[in-house]
Amino acid sequence: MPFVGEIFAQLKTAPDIQVLQEIRDGQFSGVTGPELLELVRKARTFLSSKGLKKGDRCGILAPNSIRWIALDLAAMAEGLIVVPLYFRQSPAELVAMMKDSMPVLVCSGDATLRDGIQQAWPQSSPLPLFDEIFRGVEGISLARPQVRDEDPVTIIYTSGTSEEAKGVVLTAANVGFMLGCTSARLDELMDGRTGQDRIFQYLPFSFCASWIAVLTFMLRGSLVTLNTDLTKIASDMPAVAPHYFLNVPQLLERMRRGVDEQIAQKGGLAQIIYSRAKAAWGRKGEQPQTGDSFWLWLANALVFPAIRKKMMGEHLKALICGSAPLTPETQDYFKMLGIPVLLVYGLTETTGICTMDDPKNPVPGRVGPAIPGIDMRLADNGEIIVKGPNVFPGYWNRVQQTAEVLRGGWFHTGDQGEQDETGRWKIVGRIKNLIVLGSGHKIAPETIEDEVAKHLPGAQQIVIVGNGRGYLSAIVTGNVNKEQVQAALDAVNPDLPHYKQIRAFVTRTEPFSIENGMLTANGKLKRDLISAQMKNEIDDIYRTVKTA
């Protein structure tokens, strides 16, 4: 049975138990399994009344909500192909995706989003609002889901870091396979626990991994609480008290800095215990000092449990993190607090996931082994290639680009990787991000950027440039001055070979963001665009700085 039918069957078994809820200003409102199915029925009734046929595209443009999930399930059950659109992207970017996929309908969460599309593209498809869709007609019972394993169920647009976003087609078989893998790994994490898992969900459903996650949670009969205001994540998390939830590195880095700042402001005995335990933890396995074990014991008894409870409530078993590299230091920091951070790696083209950490033994800096049923290898150039039921059939209406990444039965990820003797993978960087200096040296910038960031906490982003040049330079954004940047480079450069040293930089107060077009929808740097738009500043660096 395709996954949509399995989710419907699971929802029918929970007549009196809430499965989804939203949190708004600290107040919860939710639905049981049958109540969610009623919303699905209303949405199916609306879609059916519009004469849509199997294989038609249906866009969803809205922030996360219970109705978003109901509409998604309804559209797939009707045999439609869902095109999720990220509500924070610019209307111009959204219109480009809509012109590419040509949805028959684009269902909008509110009038503001609808009006933005209509202004950018007056000839757009009809844009019904959720209020109209879920008004519904009582008494109509629709047939079981029409979706089959081989049917496409979604077109998810990739980030497009250096070119126009491409629509990734995923089938019911892709999704069904992945849901089995993710659910099995969560079984390992929960280790035989009975009852509902409690999950906090803030990442947009238009992102593949977030969408796979929420489908997995519903298939498991979990209670999923949806954050509706990103500015209130810090207060919503402990109120929900989740067992686990999906994260991006940016939030975990921010949480780590936040704890440091709050403890420092509080001062007193808690600050003394925290700082000494943190220093002791940093020395583990190297040269421990007398008293290290005492300070760690004291922090585990008095300070760390209070931090965990204040941040995330009292039930947390693990944090799950993906979408971009997380620094090993941050992963190790949460381990110190008693919070395992489980990394996952994958791309939209691999149905979101290729590897998942072992819940019982995550290794900082590694993203775990390939999940069962998936074959991952390194090509001759160090690129990760993947084969398995999770690999997509192709890009929407892009035959040539599909052929470029699907070669010989293998999907070429564009990522550089390493695998250790235990089978765990490490992601080194992007093949396309390689900087080739005029000397011929090839450099992956990500590792160096991460190292500089450790010494520059006020920076928002560090972007290394230098393709075709004689040496590397950096663009640094955020609240930093030139003396701080130079101090960070002075700390990092001595440990690098000469060709990897950063010899010049330029600062920029305004960080790169989704809103100013410099980041993709899921927060990745658009390096080519940054280099193009800051060409004059970069040229100035190389005109004024002499090589050593």
Image: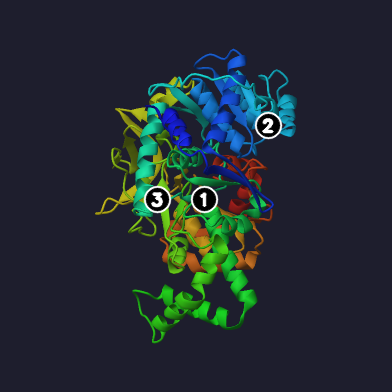
Tell me, yes or no, whether the two marked residues, 3 and 1, touch with CB atoms within 8 Å: no
Q: CA distance from mark 3 to mark 1?
A: 18 Å
- In the picture of the structure, the residue carrying the numbered disc 2 is 91
Task: Please tell me whether mark 3 sits on a helix, a strand or a loop.
Answer: strand
Quarter where residue 6 is shown: top left
Residue 537: which disc?
none
Q: Position of residue 149 (x, y in %)?
A: 38, 24
- Seen from the viewer's position, the closer of residues 316 and 41 is 41
Task: Please tell me whether mark 1 sits on a helix, a strand or a loop.
Answer: loop
Residue 428: which disc?
3
Q: CA distance from mark 2 to mark 1?
A: 24 Å
Tell me, yes or no, whether the two marked residues, 2 and 1, touch with CB atoms within 8 Å: no
Q: Is residue 512 left or right of residue 313?
A: right
Q: Position of residue 212 (x, y in %)?
A: 46, 38
Neighbour tally class for label 2: few under 14, some 14-19, many 20 plus, Cα within 10 Å: some
* Residue 247 visible somewhere in the drawing: no
- Kindly report which numbered mark, 2 or 3, lies closer to the viewer in this rendering: 2
Upstream in the sequence, badge 2 or badge 3? 2
Q: What type is the residue that disc 2 sits on?
A: Pro
Q: Is residue 446 left or right of residue 270?
A: left
* Residue depicted at 46% across the width and 51% down the height: 321
Upstream in the sequence, badge 3 or badge 1? 1
Q: Is residue 252 above or below residue 437?
A: below
Q: Position of residue 369 (x, y in %)?
A: 31, 48
- Seen from the viewer's position, the closer of residues 481 and 155 is 155
Tell me, yes or no, whether the two marked residues, 2 and 3, touch with CB atoms within 8 Å: no
Residue 248: which disc?
1
Task: Please tell me whether mark 2 sits on a helix, a strand or a loop.
Answer: helix
